[in-house]
Image (tube, rainbow, N blue to C red):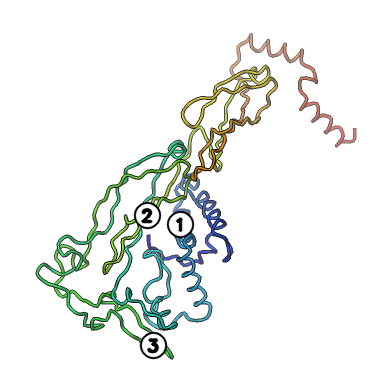
Amino acid sequence: MGMATKGDYYDILGVARDATQEEIRKAYLKLAHKYHPDKTGGDKKAEEKLKEVNEAYDTLKNPDKRSQYDAMCRAQAAGFGGFGPGFDTTFTGGFGGFEAPFDDFFDVLFGRTSRTRRHGVRPGNDLEYRMRITLREAAKGTSKRIRFSRMELCVDCNGTGAARGTQPTTCPECRGSGQIRRAQGFFSISQTCPRCRGTGQAVLSPCTRCGGSGRGQVERELQVDVPPGVDTGQRLRLAGEGEPGEGGGPRGELYVVIEVESDEIFQRDGNDVYCEVPISFAQAALGDTIQVPTLDGGKAELRIPPGTQPGTKFRLAGLGVRDVRGYYTGDEYVVILVEVPTKLTREQRELIAKFQELASAQSYPLHRRFIEKLKRSLGS
């Protein structure tokens, strides 16, 4: 999480700047399917593209983040970028908003102040975990235990970064204000102090355990309940399971990104599923009642009428995937494949040959119509 994307978020998702939230969601799901590892074969460029798509959606799906991002784009278009060394207008999703320099610029430009900024209070970093599940698990829901690594406050210094028996002192760079001012032409720009990162305090004797960072990597385990109907690209939000904030700021979030694996029997299309079932020539010609697999692991009875053609599609209502919001359940579609027999015995060959002798044009209406169309096209 937290990587900066150079491209415009709207361009990445392929939507207009005035797109509705539903249009943004649909565009995201379409791209998530397109760049899914199962479809791209693990292509590295596709993986990077999927990361860009996820980052863009993370911002544009959130009305607050989206409005901030739009404000930044308007400001850059108006010529407020490039105020000199150290002034950064890069947007990042890592801390759930804009980095401090850009916020400080707007504070000065519009006469705002931010007490949380002045005291170095920042929300924790969001984290992302990619969970692979089967299509059947996605259909009925599942519960999985995940293990991931996140930053936590150092147990020795309790996050201060100072060695035991010592305390952070007033930052000599900003003299405890957490801010430094730089003259940029007609503007006086207030920026977060790079040494103390806005806390107003500096560590002279770093903690030996964390090296003065105040944090360290810790393994965390969680039980995640996945609701029925999820699809590739959808995310589950686990509030407060991200990394701790700075200066008393709230924890970030943990987002579990779903990746649904391909299934050997079923293909999913939205909430509907498709299943190809082979039958014999005799079953197709004479009709039959067969058993077909269902997504829940059971079987359903399907009547094959006489004369069924290859590619005929039968609908089994309500046997698809339940909508993730619980509004409805999709259908299962059985596509018939008529299998031509191979490795025939002598007796079988003779019987088929006899059948062919007895067959008439009425037995093959598709072939008859094709010949008639061919004659008309040739003018004969």
Q: Name the residue under label 2.
A: 128
Residue with the mark numbered 3: 188
Name the kind of residue labelled 3 in the image. Answer: Ser
- Quadrant occupied by the N terminus: bottom left
Disc on the earlier residue, 1 or 3:
1
Q: Give the residue drawn at x 55%, y 43%.
A: 270
Relative to 168, 192 lies left or right: right
| C-alpha separation, residue under disc 1 versus residue under disc 3 | 36 Å
Height in image: 22 above or below 341?
below
Q: How far apart are marks 3 and 2 (CA)?
A: 38 Å
Tally of marks: 3
Tell me which label, 2 or 1, sits earlier in the chain.
1
Residue closer to the observer: 245 or 260: 245
Which of the two labelled residues, at mark 3 and mark 2, occupies the earlier sequence position? Answer: 2
Which residue, given by chain and number where applicable, does mark 1 sit on? 54
Q: Residue 192 location in percent, x, y?
A: 32, 78
Farthest residue, direction front? 327
- SS label for mark 3: strand
Looking at the image, is mark 1 or mark 3 nearer the viewer?
A: 3
Say if 145 sits above or below 153 in the image. above
Disc 2 vs disc 1: Cβ atoms closer than 8 Å? Answer: yes
The answer to whether the residues at label 3 and label 2 have Cβ atoms under 8 Å apart is no
Amino acid carrying label 2: it is Glu
Query: Residue at 56% across / 32% down in the picture?
Result: 275
Residue 23: x percent and y percent?
Answer: 57, 57
Q: Which residue lies furthest to the left in this view?
A: 165
Mark 1: secondary structure = helix
Please give the label number shown on residue 32: none
